[in-house]
Image: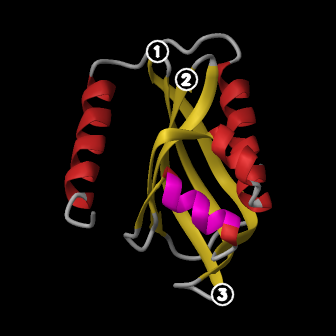
Amino acid sequence: MSSLLPTRLVLLFAGLVALATLGRAAAPAGFDAALRTADDERVAAILSGNAARLDAIFSDDLSYTHSNGDFDNKKSYLEKLVSGSTKYTTYQYTERKFSSIAPGIALMNARVKIKGRSVASPQLDVYLSVLAVFREEQGKWRFLAWQSARLPDAPAATK
């Protein structure tokens, strides 16, 4: 699967760039509030490690690329979160903006301070720049993709 990772990333970001160059879609009324609610629920589910909540929030097509380059699909990321091999304890945004790029597709650009632990990082304490994608599926915003990069120390967190 690791040989597919660069191809998947290139295709994902090429598609996002193509959509962005077509012009931003007009955001429907309540767009920001709906996406903020969806992302807040995603964070709460990740912190809880509850399989049913995570399954309902994550798209079946989830593509999750960690800041260290590791890749997870829905099944592998759920397994990590539910088993506790990856456990997040703190999730604090210093910036979070949503944009509509096409009907039913939204981007979230954010900066977030995350603490926790994983098999790879027993004491995880990172500040990340994030590009996340949400897709409206059967009338509900679901978490489709994540790509993050590590940043220097975080400023004070805001909501």
Q: Does the magenta stretch include residue 143?
A: no
Query: Label 1: how many residues lie within 10 Å, few (<14), some (14-19) or many (20+)?
Result: few
**Which residue was labeled with disc 3?**
123
Residue at 41% across, 19% down: 24
- Residue 122 drawn above or below residue 37: below
Q: Nearer the viewer, residue 18 or 51?
A: 51
Query: Label 3: how many residues lie within 10 Å, few (<14), some (14-19) or many (20+)?
Result: few
Q: In which quarter of the image is residue 116?
A: bottom right
Residue at 33% across, 27% down: 20
Instruction: Judge left or right: residue 124 versus residue 74.
Output: right
Residue 143: image tag: none
Separation of residues labelled 1 and 2 (CA atoms): 8 Å
What's drawn in magenta, residue-wise?
75-82
Separation of residues labelled 3 and 2 (CA atoms): 34 Å
Horizontal and vertical percent position of residue 73? 44, 54
- Check whether the beta carbons of the residues at disc 1 and disc 2 lie within 8 A of each other: yes
- Residue 146 drawn above or below residue 36: below
**Which residue was labeled with disc 2?**
136
Residue at 26% across, 50% down: 8
Local secondary structure at mark 1: loop
Q: How is the image coloured?
A: secondary structure
Q: Which amino acid does label 1 sit on?
A: Pro
Residue 103: image tag: 1
Q: Which amino acid does label 2 sit on?
A: Glu
In the picture, which quadrant includes the N terminus?
A: bottom left
Horizontal and vertical percent position of residue 133? 48, 39
Q: Which amino acid does label 3 sit on?
A: Gln
Separation of residues labelled 1 and 3 (CA atoms): 40 Å
Instruction: Judge left or right: residue 43 versus residue 154.
Output: right
Q: Does the magenta stretch include residue 78?
A: yes
- Residue 155 drawn above or below residue 110: below
